[in-house]
Amino acid sequence: MATSLAEKCEALGIRLISTKGLVEEAMNSLAWAEKMCEPLAPDEEMAFIYRVYNQDGGFRPNPYIDGYVATHDERGFRRFAKYAKSLKMGTYAETLKRLDGVGVEVSSIEDAGALDGQRMAYIQLKNEILVERESRGTDRGGEFQAHVEAEVLCRMLAEREERRSATRSLEAAYFVSSSRLFDHLFEPRYGHLTWAPEILVKHLSLLAPSESDPESLIEALWTDMASLGITLVDQESYRRFFDPLISSSRMSFQEEKDRFVASLEADSQMTPEDLQREYESVPDLQKPRFVAQLLGRQEVLGLRRLEVEVAERAKREKELEAKLKQAEREFDEKRTATVEHFQNRIRNLTDPARRDKLSRKQKNKERKKKKK
């Protein structure tokens, strides 16, 4: 779609301008994908791309990963690094050359000499954008992102001022973006600011028709769906790319199915056949995720049972400890009583007065026996 957009703009005499900040953002997305994939083994790289595809773990869609998946068979790419190298965007200069090749100028408010006159406006716009993004919770790019967007807006407003049309029915410059932030914040002040890419392609298709327009319109629809979180790459391309992962998950499922059902016996009436039907009803692209969740649920069940077992064992230990302490108390009491008893006996037996008294009693008994 970007190629079609560039061709139509060239045919209609429309300038396409980017900024250094936007180019750096695009390069950062590629650098992030390269950095994440570089240390991974092939199977690990595929698992990582699968997580990005499903947006697991907070990952967001990445256009370069989509591009890799879409072209890896056709162009023989077996690793993301080879695809990234083929883009020739390793340096800023290489990226500028690629953009120049499709007719995209790269400039900034500094290059245009407008920063001196717009410095205060730039600072104000940057602060407004940063505050708005923070309130929306979309400020992951921080101050750099706010700088990039403020620069774009300043550059665009300067272009409008320089080339303002006599009728004012159509402004001279617009921002091509899927983001609606500019219009949300600044439309009352500056009028309509943003063209969505898919809408612009459709509009230019009417002004500059060509044989490839049907394909462009289809690609535009894909982009429209992408703004709703749907991938630009067709599902069949992803299914072919993830086929090893899907096959591996199928084997894992067959190995773990009976074990999982057995672990559920106390909590569910599910049979292996029920689980098999549930697995088959899941689309192929979601099967690895299904198996991962299955194993996760099995692990959770195992942990819960282990927690119950540990709790019961701890309870038994407390009961045994209480019995042991009770037995120790009873033993101490008996031992104390026994010691006191024998101490008393020893004291009595060793007391002279007591011995004399016992001796007299014994003699009296003997005398009484003699008299009888």
Image (cartoon, rainbow, N blue to C red):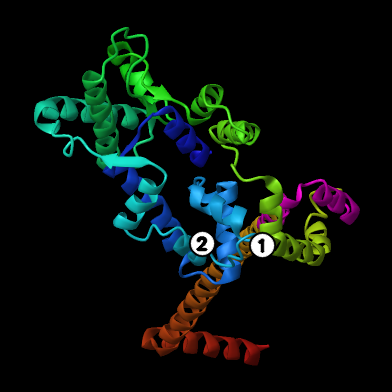
Residue 1 to residue 173: above or below: below
Q: Amino acid at mark 2?
A: Tyr
Magenta residues, start to end: 270-296
Q: Position of residue 195 (x, y in %)?
A: 44, 24
Answer left or right for 290 relative to 71: right
Secondary structure, mark 2, is helix
- The image quadrant where one finds the N terminus is top right
Residue at point 21% right, 21% down? 162
The image's mark for residue 83 is 2
Q: Amino acid at mark 1?
A: Glu
Answer left or right for 233 relative to 168: right
- Distance Cα–Cα, label 2 vs label 1: 52 Å
Looking at marks 2 and 1 on the same chain, the residue that comes earlier in the sequence is marked by 2
Q: Position of residue 338 (x, y in %)?
A: 52, 79
Nearest the eye: 104 or 289: 104
Residue 229 to residue 196: above or below: below
